[in-house]
Amino acid sequence: MLTLRRLAVIPTLRCTLRCRLCCNSVPLYDRPPLLPAEEVAADIDAAFALADRIEWFQFVGGEIFLYRDLADLIARAAAHRSQFDRLILMTNGTLLPPPGVCSELASLAPDCEVQISDYGPLSPRVRDLEELFARHGIPCRTKIFHGDLQHYGGWVDNTSYAFRGYTQPQVQELFRSCWQIRLANAHMYRGRIHPCIRSLFGQDLGLIPVPPGDYVDVRDLSQSREEKREILARFGQLPPLACRYCGGFDSLRAERFPAAEQAAP
């Protein structure tokens, strides 16, 4: 049995905000695409063909409600209902969901949840979203990221992809204390599954020379299912190369900054 604790699928990195410390590196992209729905759907099928079970199957962005075919992707994930425990959506509270999303989520309730990041004045639809999901019986949780009650005390600054020159013990400590590794928070974008977002976006932006053994490309037909499953099973056991380009995601000790500060245009 191969179980993934969390897998976050990213249909787009387009966003309604431009947060300076965005952990998904959105400000580094000029105009990220809206990936074709049929392409993302095929990636979803391929991910479930590799993993026997995924505890949390997530859709994240960018801003996920910018993706007009989101309902179709939720339906495609729901076709694999026996293989996941919960389906999670994450939104920044700026938009209402596109057509069909509430219907698809309601069919999965209570085994789904919408997580809303509340950035104060930057998130004008938070109350509307809470009321909408309540009417449809869809579980919803709002995380406060403004004022004096910022979730986890705010954000960390991990925007630089510079090579850090760490010693091996430093790499091991960075890896050991990383919240992404502890949560087994894998992400998939353009068919590539990485154990952490630094590895994924570092590769996608051409800023980290990620080796083949650090990720799985579900679209790569030259690699067998068994080889891909072996790589996925090793996620979280050894530091990926991306650790050497990372400032750390220590949930206890890393310096905190106000969330959602907007980057210059």
Image (cartoon, grey):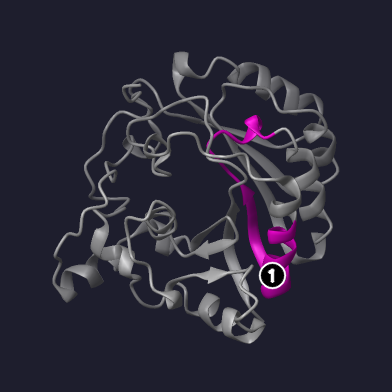
| x, y percent for residue 153 | 32, 36
Please tell me whether residue 239 is drawn above or below residue 252 in the rendered image: below
Query: Splitting the image into 4 quarters, where does residue 47 fall?
Result: bottom right
| x, y percent for residue 146 | 39, 23
Side of 245 where 116 appears, left or right: right
> Is residue 109 visible to us here?
no
Please tell me whether residue 31 is drawn above or below residue 238 in the rendered image: above
**How many residues crowd mark 1 within 10 Å: few (<14), some (14–19), many (20+)?**
many
Side of 176 where 58 appears, left or right: right
Side of 204 where 56 appears, left or right: right
Q: Residue at x 46, y 25 (%)?
A: 17
| x, y percent for residue 29 | 42, 38
Looking at the rendered structure, the secondary structure element under dot 1 is: strand
Q: Residue at x 74, y 28 (%)?
A: 98
Query: Splitting the image into 4 quarters, where does residue 212 fall?
Result: bottom left
Q: Which residues are magenta?
A: 42-67
Q: Residue at x 53, y 29 (%)?
A: 92
Q: Amino acid at mark 1?
A: Arg
In-front residue for pair 107/101: 101
Q: Residue at x 63, y 78 (%)?
A: 2
In-front residue for pair 215/265: 265
Find disc 1 in the rendering and name its residue: 53
